[in-house]
Image (cartoon, rainbow, N blue to C red):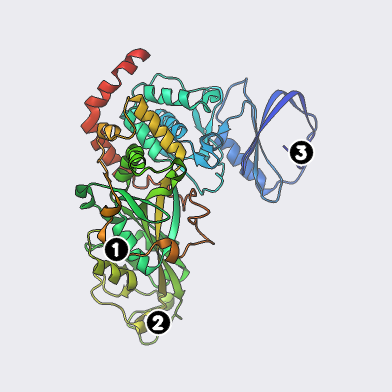
Amino acid sequence: MAYEGWSNTTISGGQFSNVHGSQTNITHVHGNLVQAQQIRRELTKWDDTFIQDFNRFTHIRSPRVAQLFGYSDNQNGSLALIFYNAWIPLSHVIFKNNILSPLLYAYFGHQLTLWKPDEDIDIGDLWIDPRSGELHLGPHVQIPLYKSWMLLSYPSNSMLNRQLPPLSIQTYSDMGTTFDYLTRAVHTVHIILGIARCDMTFWQELIDEDAESILQTLSGTIFHEPSQKITARMPVEVRDRTYYYLFRADISSDAIRESLDVMEDGSVQFTVMPMDIQSVEEITLRYLLSSFAELAYSWITQAHRVFTQHRIDEDEWDEYGMLAELTLIFKCKRQHPMLQENTSITSGSSGAGPVYLFIQPVPQPSDDNEVWRFWAEGTKYFWSSDPSGKEEMSEAMQLSLGLPSFTSEIGTLYDSWDQSAYEAIKMVHHHHHFDSSTTDLASMAGLPILEVVGDDDQFETWEDSTEITSTSVSRESDGPTLDTCRDEEYDNVQRWFCVEEDSSMLKEMEEENEVEMELMHVDEESDIK
């Protein structure tokens, strides 16, 4: 590590090992640390920051352990930490070539459950104590390619054995040891969840013609992403109850965002003070498919069955995935001048009364082609002075209040899995003496059995559609694309977006299979005792 502006310091008997991250440099020092000289200097903003971080992250109070903190005086202001017996950033362990290790993710999800049950923490904030193997909070380490990625704990009742000590850091590269630990520590269903959550995503903008067919047809299916050819789908009873629902709205104005209300017909209402909207440049609404988590878990347990039946080569496995999210992006087209003439609403310094921005409801997969076409090609918002939205506001009124108009974009988020996830789930099949080309594991976990789709079973509405690879617009400048960034996270959608849906489905699965799961593990528990 290079030190700038460093006062004279003597390190005797020193042994060094460096761990380099994108934001943090860590040095292990064994020996005596002696400050030989102290240099006077003027205080800077970094001194206050140092004191705050020192107080926050100095947890160990052992006379045999010293934790030293410092900042590198460089242009980027990157944090430089010096530790004795240093903790290791979890992100340096759990990611392999910028892809999550499925078994390590499941393992550390269990460790998080032991420490903080039912909590989710950014992987960049978690560190491993190399002496105990336990997780701790520490300074944030930026994960390459990702804005953030959450480590999700399991429900507190997920564990078979609370007494197993953590694995030593030397065993993290041994997947057999990690898997053996998991089979002794947690229920199989939670290993499945951990593997399924190690997904890869990419976002793609759709033109109207594609949006109409893709968002209707591909919901609840597994398909070959380059060709959009469906290979498997949820059973009809699940498809019939699949729907899109709003789960997140991104807008710079807190007041406008907090006013959000989903109306009975599925439209979204924002209560807006005309002055508040002036600073807003973009509104993003993100809709999830209700069956997303259920399909992901079903797919990961039955993927080898589908690959076998379709004779799909291993090097093509990561080309198969599912539709996860519908995104609507509204960009301000223009800001009208604020006028006080010809309006019944007082504006200016006295403040105008509220107006209402309505976003048209998103159609559902069960709606017919005409409904989807009308929505995809039509205007997806309107202004109103009426909170019920019965009357649209005139253009003249919008001008007088300085209300913006918007252009809209439709996008979708696709999910797929790396080969490491499919190899990990095969270990689960074999652990239970199941043939991975069967539905035995899915049945044991109480998951829906997917329908394998052949060439003659493609949805009728898809036969006349156009492949998105030839007509859709990829966002090359500000978002991942199919060709270059399939494994990038888009804006922290490491979904196991909908915690409520995920948890409720998990509870239902556990209730259905609790007795069977306990019987499956009785021998393992006996071995532990």
Q: Residue at x 49, y 30 (%)?
A: 135
Give the distance between the C-alpha atoms of the residues marked 3 and 1, in whole angstroms.
59 Å
Is residue 168 at least partly visible in the picture?
A: yes
User: Does the residue at mark 2 contact the one at mark 1 (Cβ under 8 Å)?
Assistant: no
Tag of residue 32: none
Q: Secondary structure at mark 2?
A: helix
Q: Secondary structure at mark 1?
A: loop
Asked whether, in this view, residue 281 is left or right of residue 363, the answer is right
Q: Nearer the viewer, residue 10 or 347?
A: 10
Q: Secondary structure at mark 3?
A: loop
Sequence order check: which comes first, mark 3 or mark 2?
3
Compared to 413, does 174 lie above or below? above
**Looking at the rendering, which quadrant does residue 141 occupy?**
top right
What type is the residue that disc 1 sits on? Val
Disc 3: which residue: 6
Disc 1: which residue: 362
Q: Nearer the viewer, residue 195 or 53?
A: 195
Asked whether, in this view, residue 498 is left or right of residue 449, the answer is right
- Say which quadrant the C terminus sits in: top left
Disc 2: which residue: 399
Q: Nearer the viewer, residue 462 or 372?
A: 462
**Looking at the rendering, which quadrant does residue 183 occupy?**
top left
- Say which quadrant the N terminus sits in: top right
Compared to 366, does 523 lie above or below? above
Give the distance between the C-alpha atoms of the residues marked 2 and 1, in whole angstroms.
27 Å
In the rendered image, residue 459, in percent from the top left (x then y), is placed at: 27, 57
In the rendered image, residue 65, in percent from the top left (x then y), is placed at: 62, 23
In the rendered image, residue 54, in percent from the top left (x then y), is placed at: 60, 36
Sequence order check: which comes first, mark 2 or mark 1?
1
What type is the residue that disc 2 sits on? Leu
